[in-house]
Image: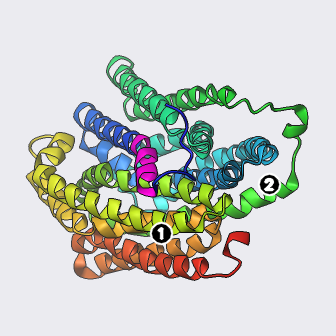
Amino acid sequence: MAPLKLTEGRPIKQIILFSLPLIGGSLFQQLYNFIDTLIVGRLIGVDAVAAIGAYYPLSFLIMGFVQGTCIGYSIPLSHSVGEENHAAIRQYLTNAVWLCLVLAVILTPLMVALTPTLLTALHTPNQILQLTIIFTAISFLGIPANILFNYSADALRSFGDAVHPLYFLIVSLVVNVILDLVFILVFHWGIAGAAIATVISEFIGGLLNLTVFPKFSLGLTRKDWAVNWARIKKMNLIGLPMGFEYSVSAIGAIVMQDAINLLGTSIIAAQSAAEKIRQLFTLPMESVGAAMATYQAQNFGAKQRGRMKRGIIDGVWIQVIYSAAAFIIINLAKTPLVTAIIGPGHPDIVREANYYIIIISCYFPVHGILMIFRNTLQGWGHSFYAIFSGMGELIGRTTAGWLSIAGLGFTAIAYANPLAWGLALAYCIFMVIRVFRRKNFLDD
């Protein structure tokens, strides 16, 4: 399948076609996460499921920063593709490589060293503390692989190629599941084996992504690999705010996890299982959002103002229709899905997880529409503004964490994400309208 040119054709058709591989990738990713949690829960135990759940906020903080930064580094590349500026395309691509290397060198040793301190500060229960430290430290050792996988896929999508990243994601996920079984059943590495499997599979997926770039006939020369400080500055002005936006939002998740940890291991396991299922259904919305960022970036570069506005409207409709379907399916399937993860014999955990799923699924449209407006801002290159949408999520999740400690318990935790999404959406809608109405909008 040839790369899509998002500056031509009906916006809704182009958005859907570009989204489909991203949605497929998200579904396979979450299917893997589900299978991975199922393998860990059945072969290692509920404590291991809780340990992975306790790691999630730190993953959201650091891996989210990596993911957001890599997406941001690809936005100027998308602008250049829309402008058909081949010199800029080569320079943005090569200078992003240098930035990714610096990111890996700084983050990897820092986060591995801080792992025990951070998990202790989060009041991770002693029952699962060592398991969580092992899983988290190994996952952070894999930061370079995560950067390679994310940026190579984002750069391919900037060219309109969302298909090859999907193919290679599927390959890496299959490898991951196989390695999970080998490392846990054959080598008896326990939760460490699950973390090692993920790192290896991400590295393989990143290497496979690199094999596609020669087809674009970029004609890279030694001169293109020279550090271009103007390009680096522009990528950092977009990429770092996007990374910090993810991290600011994650701080709220960390505060919330602290509150969850105080509620005990059973609640940690229930929320962890419910979140795995929730993510299985909401990541397609985030994939549509990622497609919107590339769509808006290419059309911004091509100065197609009308297509940009139409894309927002069409994107909202896509998210609303999907949210309605997801609400019905998740509520019909919640009990079997939770039981599959936790295993039989844990009725209290299943009940709490179902309660969480019922509440959060009512607010799927808010999450979906947020993905459209936030990624629109980012696609236009205004990622600094998007940081403040992360502040909205921080306020929402932090408030829920405090309310949980104050006496509302798990009910406050269940409403944390909807509250965070609502505050962030209100801000993003306001900013999109404000930026779009500027007279010099396309010259920003």
Q: Is residue 15 magenta?
A: yes
Name the one closer to the observer, 417 or 47.
417
Q: In the rendered structure, which amino acid carries the disc numbered 1?
A: Phe
Q: How far apart are marks 2 and 1 (CA)?
A: 26 Å
Q: Name the residue under label 2.
A: 232
Q: Residue, x 38% and y 45% (percent of image)?
A: 23
Q: Which of marks 2 and 1 is in front?
A: 1
> x, y (%) of residue 175?
42, 24
Q: In this view, does 220 lie above or below 70?
A: above
The stretch in magenta equals 11-22
Label 1 crowd bin: few (<14), some (14–19), many (20+), radius 10 Å: many
The residue at the far top in this view is: 186
Residue drawn 30% across the image and 40% down it: 37
**Can residue 351 be found in the magenta stretch?**
no
Q: What element carries label 2?
A: helix
Q: Name the residue under label 1.
A: 373
State the image quarter where residue 195 is shown. top left
Q: Furthest-front residue in view?
A: 9
Closer-to-camera residue (301/130): 301
Q: Nearer the viewer, residue 419 or 220?
A: 220
The kind of secondary structure the magenta stretch mainly shows is: helix
Asked whether residue 300 is in view, the answer is yes
Q: Is mark 1 on a helix, strand or loop?
A: helix
**Which of the 4 quarters of the picture holds residue 337?**
top left
How far from the left and from the top, in percent, is residue 270? 23, 55
Q: What residue type is labelled 2?
A: Ile
Between 348 and 204, the one nearer to me in the picture: 204
From this view, report whether residue 427 is shown above or below residue 137.
below
